[in-house]
């Protein structure tokens, strides 16, 4: 056995954990390829949500989440990921796996992957300890992004107004509504948001109202939502910024899970230029580009745990790296012996 190259079981196990990452509408818009100690990540353009995500922002953020999940999983299995982002057109990341001495922190973060859920229900009205806020912010900054906790009333008002405006504009778009219905409400599909994980819409409550999915069956509560609202932001809005924002989102979500906090990412206010600019200018002072809202907090003690959402079979998302042209091809009879 070559101790410098991961075996098939290790790579499949790491990718299986990577694809537990959240993605817009649970669309899972990624494709993985592997050969030797090299793993490549590409976007699956066929899974881009053209009416929800017209400029591909959510697709790149989703792939960034999966990329970070993969590095966490690999580290827990004894492999460090050396990442080259956008090394060539059409390739989001090329990852070289090298032997790594696994630490307790690697195992703890990887153990959070199967525990994490996108919890869209209201959270308890309990403030986060200051130390937890510091840890969450650091998890984002370690990935090249900034996690801004939205505490001031004018900023919260601007964020909730942007979310409400985006939801209204989307509801007025029949193509968006058709796309949303196609990606939600199916409990036994390998992708999409299942009805059992989507919250039944009640009368509007004060605060942030998150996206309403078709066929929702998860009971809501009439009380206020005590979630801490944060914005994950980048210095720019290039494809690299979006991919890195996804990596930061993964780090924040897994860290929150490790701290026994509930969490949920929310992108609707940033899928439209007008509402994204509103948040950028009125909440972030025009200095950062908003990429995601991350809700974190404590779930009520009597709340049943959420079931895991389904994922596509590993054979659909992980395939061998294509051989370089000419490698492994048989030598023609007329050229043998020359």
Image: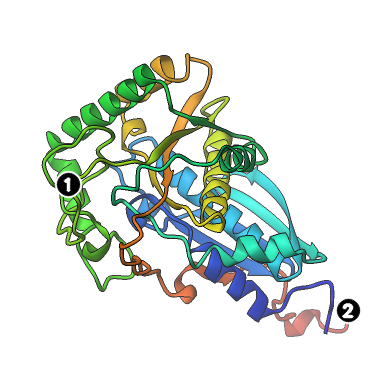
**175 or 75: nearer the viewer:** 75
Is residue 327 shown to the viewer in this render?
A: yes
Mark 2 and mark 1 lie on one chain; the one further toward the N terminus is: 1
Q: Is residue 274 left or right of residue 249?
A: left
Which quarter of the figure is the N terminus placed in? bottom right
Residue wearing tag 1: 222
**What residue is at 27 percent from the left and 33 percent from the top?**
207
Work out whether residue 325 can be spotted.
no
Residue 295 higher or lower than 8, as above or below:
above
Above or below: residue 133 compared with residue 321: above
Could you tell whether 61 is left or right of 141 in the image? left
Q: Residue at x 49, y 25 (%)?
A: 289
User: Which quadrant holds the C terminus?
Assistant: bottom right
Q: Which residue is mark 2?
A: 338
Relative side of 205 to 54, left or right = left
312 to 258, vertically: above or below: below
């Amino acid at each position: 056995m070559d101790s410098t190259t991961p075996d098939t079981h290790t790579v499949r196990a790491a990718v299986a954990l990577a694809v537990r990452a959240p993605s817009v509408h649970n669309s899972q818009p990624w494709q993985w390829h592997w050969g030797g100690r090299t793993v490549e990540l590409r976007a699956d353009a066929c899974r881009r949500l053209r009416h929800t995500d017209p400029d591909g922002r959510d697709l790149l953020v989703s792939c960034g989440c999966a990329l970070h999940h993969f590095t966490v999983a690999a580290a827990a299995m004894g492999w460090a990921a050396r990442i080259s982002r956008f090394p060539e057109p059409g390739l989001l990341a090329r990852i070289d796996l090298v032997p790594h001495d696994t630490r307790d922190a690697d195992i703890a973060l990887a153990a959070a992957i199967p525990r994490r859920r996108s919890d869209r229900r209201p959270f308890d009205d309990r403030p986060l300890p200051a130390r937890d806020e510091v840890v969450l912010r650091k998890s984002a900054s370690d990935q090249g992004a900034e996690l801004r906790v939205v505490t001031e009333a004018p900023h919260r008002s601007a964020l909730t107004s942007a979310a409400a405006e985006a939801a209204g504009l989307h509801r007025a778009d029949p193509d968006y509504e058709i796309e949303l219905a196609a990606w939600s409400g199916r409990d036994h599909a390998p992708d999409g948001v299942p009805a059992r994980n989507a919250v039944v819409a009640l009368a509007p409550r004060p605060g942030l109202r998150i996206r309403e999915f078709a066929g929702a069956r998860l009971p809501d509560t009439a009380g206020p939502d005590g979630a801490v609202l944060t914005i994950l932001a980048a210095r720019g809005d290039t494809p690299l910024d979006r991919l890195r924002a996804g990596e930061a989102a993964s780090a924040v979500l897994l860290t929150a899970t490790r701290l026994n906090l509930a969490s949920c990412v929310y992108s609707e206010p940033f899928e439209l230029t007008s509402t994204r600019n509103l948040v950028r200018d009125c909440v972030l002072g025009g200095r950062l580009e908003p990429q995601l809202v991350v809700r974190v907090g404590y779930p009520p003690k009597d709340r049943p745990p959420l079931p895991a959402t389904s994922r596509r079979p590993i054979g659909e998302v992980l395939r061998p790296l294509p051989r370089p042209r000419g490698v492994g091809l048989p030598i023609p009879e007329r050229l043998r012996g020359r």
